[in-house]
Image: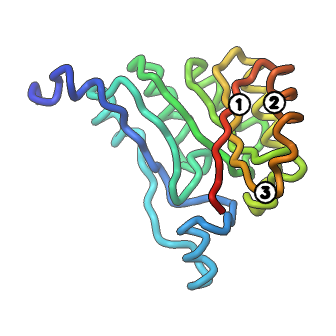
Amino acid sequence: MELFLDRDFRKKRLNIEATARCTLMCPLCKRAAHVRKHGKVPQGWEMTPDQLEKVAPYFRKITFCGQLSDPVFAKHLIPMLSICQDYDIRTRVLTAATGRSEEWYEEAFNANLQAHWTFGIDGLPEKSHRYRINQDGFFLYKMMLKAKSYGMAVWWQYIIFDWNKDQINICKQMARENNIKILFIESKR
C-alpha cells in the first residue's frame, strides 16, 4: 500500500459516479437514451461508505459527478460527504436533478460544510427544464441559495443554448446579487 501514497498519486482527483439513478431525461444523456430505447433505466450499482473508506486515504480531491446519473440520488451520499470531511478531502458535488427534499439538502450540506456545490440550471430557473427535462429549476435555485446561506462555495453551471442566450445578463445579475460564481458552458447543439 505504501506505493500508492507517493505525492503524485495523492495529487490526483477522483471522480465518483456513485449511483445510476437520476430524475432527468436530458435529450443527449446516454442514460435517458437507454430509457427511451428500452423503456427502462439501465442497471447500475450504488457505491457504499465502506468502499469510499478504502480509497479516501489516497486522494485529496473527490468529485461526485454523474455522467449517467446525479449524485444526489446516491443512497449513501450524505455519509460519503461526512467521510470526505473526516479525511479533509476537497469535495465537489455537481448536481442538476431534483427530487430530494429541502431537509435532505440541509442534511447533505451539514455533512460537509467545506464541500463545493455546483448546480446545473440552464438559464432562468423557470426555463431550465427545457433541456434538463423534469428539473424543478425553482427548487434547485432555492437549494443553491440555501447552500450559499450555509457559507459554502457555490457555482451556478449554465449551458448556453440558442433558446437561453438572451437570459445570460439576467442570470449574471442574479448570481452577482447572491455572491454566487456562474460558469457558462457553450453548447454546440
Question: Which residue position is annotated with label 3?
Answer: 162
Q: Which mark is residue 172?
A: 2
Residue 91, relative to residue 40: is it above or below?
A: above
Q: Which mark is residue 129?
A: none
Q: Is residue 42 left or right of residue 141?
A: left
Dot 3: what SS? loop
Q: Earlier in the sequence, mark 1 or mark 2?
A: 2
Q: Quadrant of the C terminus?
A: bottom right
Whether residues under marks 1 and 2 lie with C-beta atoms below 8 angstroms apart, the answer is yes
Q: Amino acid at mark 2?
A: Lys
Q: Is residue 52 left or right of residue 32?
A: left
Q: Amino acid at mark 3?
A: Asp
Q: Residue at x 31, y 30 (%)?
A: 12
Instruction: Count how many numbered circles sit on residues in the image.
Output: 3
How packed mark 3 is, by other alpha carbons closer than 10 Å (few <14, some 14-19, many 20 or more), is: few
- Please tell me whether mark 3 or mark 2 is closer to you in this view: 3
Residue 150, relative to residue 166: is it above or below?
A: above
How packed mark 2 is, by other alpha carbons closer than 10 Å (few <14, some 14-19, many 20 or more), is: some
How packed mark 1 is, by other alpha carbons closer than 10 Å (few <14, some 14-19, many 20 or more), is: some
| Percent of width and height locating residue 86 | 43, 19
Depth check: 92 or 48 in front? 92
Residue 158, relative to residue 6: is it above or below?
A: below
